[in-house]
Amino acid sequence: MAETSLYVHRATRSPAEAANWDRRQVILNNLRSVAGRAYPRVRGISREKSWLAFEILLPFLSTSAFVFVYRALKAPPEYIGFVVLGGAMTAFWLNVVWMMAAQLYWDKDQGNLELFFAAPMDVMSVLFGMAIGGLVMSSTRAAAVLLIATVLYGVQFAVSQWFLLLLVFFLTLSALYGMGMALSSLFLMWGREAWHLTQLMVEPVYFISGLNFPVGRLGMIGALAIATIPLAVGLDAMRQLAFATGPGPTGTPPPAVEALILVVMTVVFIWVARLMLRSLERRARQEGRLSARGR
Amino acid sequence: MLGSALWAFVISGMSGLAQSILEDRERYRMLKYLYVSPSDFIVVLLGRGVARIGVGAMGALITLIVGIVVLGIRFDIGAVDWPLLVLVMIGGLASIVAFGIVMAAVCMQTRQEAWSYPEAAAGALFLIVGAVFPLSVLPAAAQVLGLLNPLTWWLGGARQALFPGGQTSIGGPGSLFAEVFGHDRPTSGEIIVALLLTGALVTLASSLIFRVSDRRAKEQGLIDRTTGT
């Protein structure tokens, strides 16, 4: 009796013909690859208890420090909300930097990268899987930080447009993880400096993205951040929408325009990621050096 | 600005000692060789800690220069209280090394995921030592913890030495310090005595904790244990 599966779902006359996959097989195979790469991150949400604690604790501590700074300065209460929102979003940024950008380099170090290139799938599926898994994982951390800090510090949100707020939030995540996908190939090329690069992309990016203050206060640097860093533009748009009664205009574009910027960023970053991955894949096959460890 | 700059010492001092344990054991797998070498293990650790503090010093210096040159913070080198600065820096750095030894003792008992422990501990300390905001904005219980911490007195003393007459992070209206001691800001003498007392306590405690951890690590075979890739 003929067996039907993803790999053998049609009768073929020869192994060569069977190896020639049709579109359905290719799509299903890639979807399974996405799910397969996302699985360990989703399952790992609560498996390593110390990670769970520290991934919530660290953003919460730095958030708390800025809350007390604003209290000491007697800043308007909205600023405390700004900090709390920024603190929650750090969970996503840390995930993008450590578990997206640096991931392919670590995969190379652990010997997985050559398996990715050898497997009959599009390597973009691995990146999408990493992004989806990381997104789910970080969402739990971000929600915990947001909830605890909101209750503890009495943050009051004044949301004017819920739909736009949610849209901006999801667009921010897609642009952030698109950026992570593009950076993963770059970090792989830069090799052993990946660890230092991840360090470099934390505090300086927090500062120029206006994590704890309105990014518009940075003037030209803030404008550049809005044009290039999804965290900066997403946070600014979310703040404008979540604290509609907050401090007056900060010189940044309105949320609808920032949502459009995020759409463009998402498309560009994913296109760049695909382009770079193709180039890496070609080099890996031609030169055979990419999977060599210690580079 | 000064609190953030000086905090570079704490981050590098605390995480440097702890990460040297994790790196040598898990990554380079040579902790066991260091351990059986004729040198005293804690002396080797202290050596690595001092080197990391040197790295932190560079970070602190750069931050201060940027603050003065770029951000325009007013700083009068002629007004610096040098004796106080030297005394509080010695006491403060010794306390940082003591905290680093505690973290090293903790990391000796834990797995390689412990790399974030020093960062978390430093983050928690950051909240209660008046690094970037005065202690008076904290709840009373947190202020008590802050006043028992040598890093509070180190930062307060360095602030007082570099910017005499500036705002204090320890006292101020409504602070626990003002309530207990009856005056708004601590004098230089009070700062030095408090730093010495709290620093001595932390150093003794760290020495004890390290010895206990060291003994347990030997008994449980943790010196050459690797827990990751």
Image (tube, coloured by chain):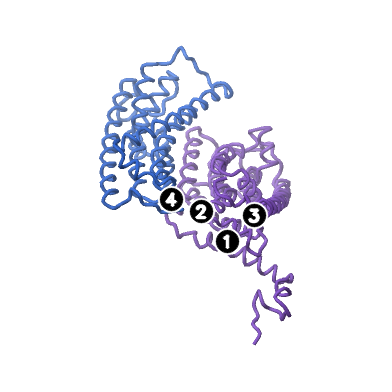
Chain colours: A purple, B blue
From the top left corner, tell me how far across and down residue A132 is, in percent: 60, 59
From the top left corner, tell me how far across and down residue B73 is, in percent: 53, 21
Q: Answer left or right for A24 relative to A98.
A: right
Task: Say yes or no: labels 2 and 3 on the same chain.
Answer: yes
**Residue B40 quadrant:** top left
The nearer-to-camera label among 3 and 4 is 4
**Circle 4: residue type:** Glu
**Circle 2: residue type:** Arg
What is the C-alpha distance between the residues marked 2 and 1? 17 Å
Task: Say yes or no: labels 2 and 1 on the same chain.
Answer: yes
- Residue that mark 4 sits on: B113
Q: Residue furthest top?
A: B78
Q: Which of marks 2 and 3 is nearer the N terminus?
A: 2
Tag 3 secondary structure? helix
**Circle 3: residue type:** Phe
Chain letter of mark 1 equals A
Chain letter of mark 2 equals A
Tag 1 secondary structure? helix
Q: Residues within 10 Å of mark 4 (few under 14, many from 20)?
A: some
Chain letter of mark 3 equals A
Chain letter of mark 4 equals B
- Residue that mark 3 sits on: A170
What is the C-alpha distance between the residues marked 3 and 4? 30 Å
What is the C-alpha distance between the residues marked 3 and 1? 18 Å
From the top left corner, tell me how far across and down residue A230 is, in percent: 65, 46
- Residue that mark 2 sits on: A141
- Residue that mark 1 sits on: A38
Tag 4 secondary structure? helix
